[in-house]
Image: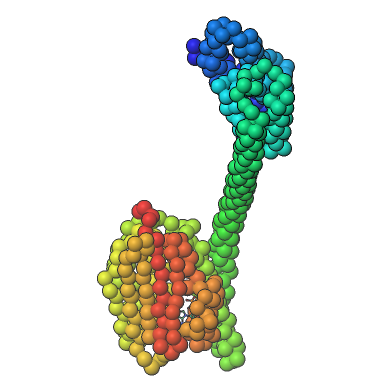
Amino acid sequence: MKQIWNRYRSTVFQNCTDASQSSEELSYWRNYLFALTILYIAPLSFIAIIPGIYMAFITGLQFLFIANILTLLILPIIAFYPGLSLGVRKFIFFFGLYLASTALLYELGSFGPGLIFLLATTFFITLIYDEKKAIWSVYIITVICITFGVLIYFEATESIMLQEYRIDSWFALSANLIFLCLVAVLIVPGLFRGLQSSLQKRNQLQAEVLKNKEELEQSMIQLKEKALELQESNRELEQFAYTASHDLKEPLRMIRNFMDLLEKNYAPQLDDKAKKYIHFAADGAKRMNELIDDLLEYSRISRLYSEFETVDMNKLVDSVIGMFEAQIEEQNAVVGREQLPQVIGVPVSLKLVFQNLIGNALKYHDKNTAPRVEIKGEETETHWAFSVSDNGIGIDEKYFDEIFLLFKRLHSNSEYSGTGMGLAMCKKVVEQHGGEIWVTSEKGKGSTFYFTIKKDRQA
Ligand code: ADP
């Protein structure tokens, strides 16, 4: 049974819809409604046809018999007859409806369903056809009303109509009928227009969203590619820096050794000027050595120092303070720390950060005041946050960002020695730990360096 119904359904839909239309068009839904109507009306019409034929036999009304037989024929033709265009099927359906309702009105007057059928046909036409075609239903009703009016006026038939209506009452009924049809033709398409425009808007919006999504995906892919390229070139650069620095160390050692030998073995022959030059050359070589060491260390971050583990920051900071013991004593400095949290990080890298920050806090200092360095740390919801503050010379606000760049120094080597790599190293480590580093400072009063470490990493 279900199979038969499914076959019947697919045949009706095949014949009574337009496969080339997409469900986003309003006309698709109009045709869909037509197909649905035929689908149900064909079997359901038996409910009306069987008692109709029975009535025709009892009353001897020939036309009733013909109307029922016509309906019996027309509906299967619309539903099944192959090769008919959708327009023709619709035309046959509505032609049949008008014919049936007019005949019923003619033969049965208000006692039959003719008037209701006429009105229903008009409403139905407004659903199935667009505005321009639907207006024809008003013309048709008008023509029917006038024709009936003429027949009544001239008493030209034997129909029940003539017994039931006088011309003035028919005129009143016709006016109402035409009025209702006109209302339907004007109102229903308005509703459809609204639906159509909201459908279009929705489709437009969907298309835009889709386009944006595609663009976004495209840029994400490009971004990923660029990130990979960047990673690769960073890796190459680090490798290059490492190799270059490594290879530079050997000739540099030679220079330093021969300078030493020159100074030792030829000291008596050298005048003061020559000795001064040798001293400058040796000093330059020493500084270059420091630079290379720092560069090597910089290139090791992430590349070699990459093992994340649980680190007790109290122990780590204490060991760094220990490294500065002699300097602290010499400068009469006070370096203190609060209770610090445990973190997940790369110990060697983190040690480098504190080494540089504490080292700088002790170095960039007025000779006459004793350095006071304070190290603090706390846990936030997403990060561990640390700070190193001092009472040193301070930094001008305009350099707050620049000082973290590679080789950026604010002082000459004769004022404060250094390579300009310490803070760049700190930045690299902090970024390796998914955090940020920044400074606040007041010139002449001191500086505080802050940095964070992201918490969601596994040891
Ligand atoms: P270096 O110390 O080798 O010069 P850094 O990268 O560690 O290189 O520092 C960059 C610059 O930032 C320094 O030259 C210095 O001028 C400034 N600086 C860093 N730390 C401090 C500090 N605690 N107080 C004042 N200035 C600082």
Name the one closer to the observer, 426 or 35: 35
How is the structure coloured here?
rainbow
Q: Residue at 72% x, 20% y: name it.
A: 156
Name the one closer to the observer, 191 or 218: 191
Name the one closer to the observer, 217 or 270: 217
Which quadrant of the view contains residue 10? top right
Q: Residue at 48% x, 61% y: name it.
A: 300
Measured from the top left, where is residue 202 in percent x and y?
59, 45
Q: Is residue 351 above or below residue 101?
A: below
Measured from the top left, where is residue 53 in percent x and y?
57, 9
Which quadrant of the view contains residue 18? top right
Q: Residue at 32% x, 65% y: name it.
A: 379
Residue 185 horizontal side relative to residue 333, left or right: right
Q: Is residue 400 visible?
A: yes
Q: How many marks?
A: 0
Residue 439 horizontal side relative to residue 215, left or right: left
Measured from the top left, where is residue 375 in percent x and y?
33, 75
Q: Is residue 112 above or below residue 232?
A: above
Which quadrant of the view contains residue 182? top right
Q: Is residue 69 visible?
A: no
Q: Is residue 371 above or below residue 62?
A: below
Measured from the top left, where is residue 70 in percent x and y?
65, 13
Q: Residue at 47% x, 73% y: name it.
A: 423
